[in-house]
Amino acid sequence: MKQLLILILLTVSCSSIREKKNVNLIDQLEILQKNEFTQINDTLTSIYNDKNYQIFVYISKPIENLNIKEHSLKLAGQIGPGRQHLNNGVFLFLSPEQRSGYIRVGTGMEWVLSDQLSDSIFKQLTPFFKNSNYSGGINKFIHLIDSCNNNVEWNSRYELPEVENSFRLNKSAIFNISGEITGIYENSFTVKVGENEYPVYLQKHFNEGEKLKMSIAKRDQVSFYCMNLEKKKLKLGFLGF
């Protein structure tokens, strides 16, 4: 019953968080000084408003009777950091009293932050947290994530016909595509836009063809977002519908 109550309360609080994108930091332990909290949340809000992606930091009380790793994954899903349709959020979960922490990356952001890179970033935070310097560690985290996104054009929206084979075809350019799905494969699908057909590649969380078929089965035309994965060459990676 206690475990169920915790989950219900978390679901309610996460729903309210999703509606307030100026809230990017939760400190259940009040481990940060007031000025530190304000500075970090203001920095995160600025990133969300100006750079069009989201970093969310959650400092948790001790969790009883729950698997911390699974709980952090579920919490990230409930809060849903990132812009709608782009799935470009990064979630830092910290449980200081249980000496645990995890980085959760949205499926759209996975084109930018691989599991290996996320692990490398977290290792750079460990010295800060071992010395109870949570403000320093979180600010280091923000700096590292923002550096990884420096060349990503999250604010841009290109149309395929006007940009293909042109000087504006940059790696990490964002496209909003509308067209007809013509084929679904293990780790990609094809879409017809005008007279041309393009392959669109799927990240690991989207590589189950049956689930993708279910999501588009009732649509004659689909609209979705994707990212260009190559420099001066068109290779599209799916972000979200």
Image (spheres, grey):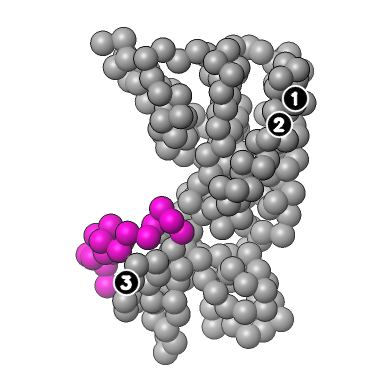
Q: Which residue is denoted by mark 1 in the rendering?
A: 128
What element does badge 2 sit on? helix
How packed is label 3: few (under 14 Cα within 10 Å), some, or many (20 or more)?
some
Place of residue 102 in the rendered image (x, y in percent of width and height, measured from the top left) = 55, 32
Residue at 42% from the left image edge and 27% from the top image edge:
71
* Amino acid under disc 3: Ile
Q: In which quarter of the image is the C terminus?
A: bottom left
Residue 219 colored in magenta in the image:
yes
Q: Quadrant of the N terminus?
A: top left
Residue at 66% from the left image edge and 13% from the top image edge:
31
Q: For the magenta stretch, what is the residue range?
A: 203-220
- Judged by depth in the image, the label closer to the viewer, 1 or 3, is 1
C-alpha gap between disc 1 and disc 3: 46 Å
How packed is label 1: few (under 14 Cα within 10 Å), some, or many (20 or more)?
some
Place of residue 2 in the rendered image (x, y in percent of width and height, measured from the top left) = 31, 10
Place of residue 120 in the rendered image (x, y in percent of width and height, measured from the top left) = 67, 42
C-alpha gap between disc 2 and disc 3: 40 Å
What element does badge 1 sit on? helix
Q: Which residue is denoted by mark 2 in the rendering?
A: 125
N-terminal of the two: label 1 or label 3? 1
Residue 206 colored in magenta in the image:
yes
* Amino acid under disc 2: Leu
Q: Which residue is denoted by mark 3 in the rendering?
A: 184
